[in-house]
Image (tube, rainbow, N blue to C red):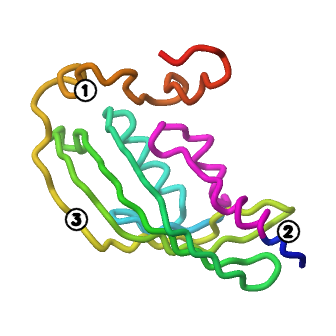
Amino acid sequence: MTDTMRLEDREAIRDCRGIDRADEAALRSGYWPDATDQHGATSGPVEGFFERVRGAWARGARNVHQVSNVLITFQGADRAAVESYFNAFQRGPGPDGVDRQVHLAGRYCDLFERRAGEWRVARRVVVYDWVDHQQPFAGDEAGRFGARQPIGGVFPDDPVYRIGEGETD
């Protein structure tokens, strides 16, 4: 395998998003349908994780994930062990209706597999290294953000889905 092909593989592994924009199709595209996910309150088939996040999205949660220091170790032509550090800021009502805000930091310990030329997560274990429960802002979004506009939103209303259309607000 050439160095150029490995660089393309690395970029394919890094190209994954969906959770913060409540974009289920984008989120699902990062996982194989038979993947497993050990993610805090859920552990098992990835479908359980998707069900949990759909509930959070329905309650109007605001999430910001920052992923960095992506370390990729190839285990043959079609498997890769991937450790990615994350910072996550999460705010919104829980299933009990109580508003919560938390800053989480940790690592995604993933097994990626390439099938039919496509890289996706086959197994994810989320390792938590930091949890900081915070007091949520008591006001509304307009009060929280003030003049800082536009405010990030969810699929399909977030400005990222209009890049190239000449419209950003």
Per the image, label 1 sits on a secondary structure element best described as helix
Tell me the number on the disc at residue 43.
none
Disc 2 vs disc 3: Cβ atoms closer than 8 Å? no
Q: Which residue is mark 3?
A: 131
Q: CA distance from mark 2 to mark 3?
A: 39 Å
Amino acid marked by disc 1: Phe
Q: Could you tell whether 65 is left or right of 34 in the image?
A: left
Q: Residue furthest bottom?
A: 75
The span picked out in magenta is: 7-33
Per the image, label 2 sits on a secondary structure element best described as helix
In front: label 1 or label 3: 1
Q: Which residue is mark 1?
A: 145
Q: Position of residue 117 (x, y in %)?
A: 85, 62
Q: Position of residue 13 (x, y in %)?
A: 67, 63
Residue 165 lies, with reference to residue 26, above or below; the image says above
In front: label 2 or label 3: 2
Q: CA distance from mark 1 to mark 3?
A: 24 Å
Q: Residue at x 38, y 74 (%)?
A: 127
